Amino acid sequence: MTKFQAMAIIGFLAALVPAQSSFAVEGNLGKVKACSPITDKCATGAVRNTAYGQQVQLPGGKWVNCAGDCSRKLRKNTVDFWQYEMLQN
């Protein structure tokens, strides 16, 4: 096999494998930890990919969309929940 033939085969096989960014991989990505700058409380939650983007799991089991930053979303919905509620009212 010549060098040219080997390169042609490698190029052909690479074209068969889709790029990872061309489709959304669903499943668990790990965990995220969120600590409050106001209190000494921290929370952890699992992170997963869905067809609609990343989601973080709250301690009660509910999954919420991360909207960009899973750690911030977890902190806002757990350890700093009442601080955000008071700011909105």
Image (cartoon, rainbow, N blue to C red):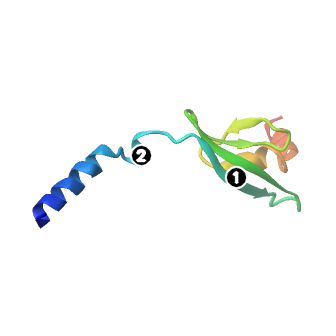
Q: Nearer the viewer, residue 36 or 5?
A: 5
Determine the residue positioned at 78% across, 35% down: 62
Amino acid found under the numbered disc labelled 1: Ser
Residue 16, placed above or below residue 11: above
Tell me how far mark 1 sits from mark 2, CA to CA.
23 Å
Q: Position of residue 2 (x, y in %)?
A: 11, 65
Which residue bears the numbered disc 2?
21
Q: Position of residue 27 (x, y in %)?
A: 61, 42
Q: Nearer the viewer, residue 49 or 5?
A: 5
Which residue bears the numbered disc 1?
71
Determine the residue positioned at 73% across, 36% down: 63
Q: Tell me which numbered mark, 1 or 2, is placed earlier along the sequence.
A: 2
- CB atoms of marks 1 and 2 within 8 Å: no
Quarter holding the N terminus is bottom left
Determine the residue positioned at 56% across, 33% down: 52
Q: Nearer the viewer, residue 48 or 74?
A: 48
Question: 69 left or right of 84?
Answer: left
Determine the residue positioned at 17% across, 60% down: 7
Q: Position of residue 55 (x, y in %)?
A: 66, 41
